[in-house]
Image: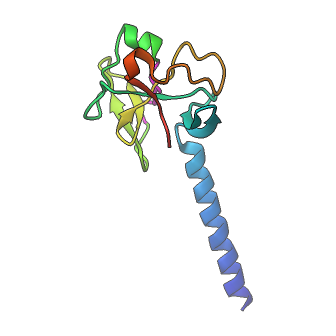
Amino acid sequence: MISKTLAAVAAAAFICASSLAFAQMAPAKIADTAKGKALVDGKGMTLYTFDKDAGGKSMCNGPCADNWPPLMASADSKPMGDWTVIARDDGKVMWAYKGKPLYSWKKDSAPGDTTGDGFNSGVWHMATP
């Protein structure tokens, strides 16, 4: 009886630890903004998607990427769940969520800012979970 209880406790601890480890590995987290829940980077800055991106490819390069910095991934990053890693034109890799590349906006100055949402005739959108 005691061994079954210990086994159940050990299994529960393993599941919790695995879930926590996965959450810590995710390249972004969810936060509240004035416009609702959004994906944010490690600094709490809102992430955005770009309507011109298609087929898992980033179309934001050069000056665009200067204004909309990509959520970069390390060379050894691996896809997980809804998160994928895509190659950029410069050979570096970035994160995408549900197939959409993610970017921050250089004019957002504080965590929770959403000034890029709807920018440029509505082609930029706050990334939502």
Residue 85: x %, y % from top left? 38, 36
Between residues 5 and 86, which one lies in front from this camera angle? 86
What colouring does the structure picture have? rainbow
Q: Residue furthest bottom?
A: 1
Secondary structure mostly taken by the magenta-highlighted segment of the chain: loop
The reply to whether the magenta stretch includes residue 70 is: yes
**Residue lying at 70% horizontally and 86% vertically, measured from the top left:** 3
Residue 7: x %, y % from top left? 66, 79
Q: Quadrant of residue 77?
A: top left
Q: Is residue 64 left or right of residue 11?
A: left
Between residues 73 and 115, which one lies in front from this camera angle? 115
Q: Residue furthest left?
A: 55
Q: Is residue 34 left or right of residue 102?
A: right
**Residue lying at 53% horizontally and 42% vertically, measured from the top left:** 26
Q: How many marks?
A: 0
Q: Quadrant of residue 109?
A: top right
**Residue lying at 63% horizontally and 29% vertically, measured from the top left:** 44
Residue 99: x %, y % from top left? 34, 39
Residue 55: x %, y % from top left? 25, 34
Q: Is residue 45 above or below residue 98?
A: above
The segment highlighted magenta reads: 69-76
On-image quarter of the N terminus: bottom right
The reply to whether the magenta stretch includes residue 68 is: no
Q: Is residue 48 left or right of residue 113?
A: left
Q: Residue furthest right?
A: 2
Between residues 89 and 59, which one lies in front from this camera angle? 59
Q: Quadrant of residue 98?
A: top left
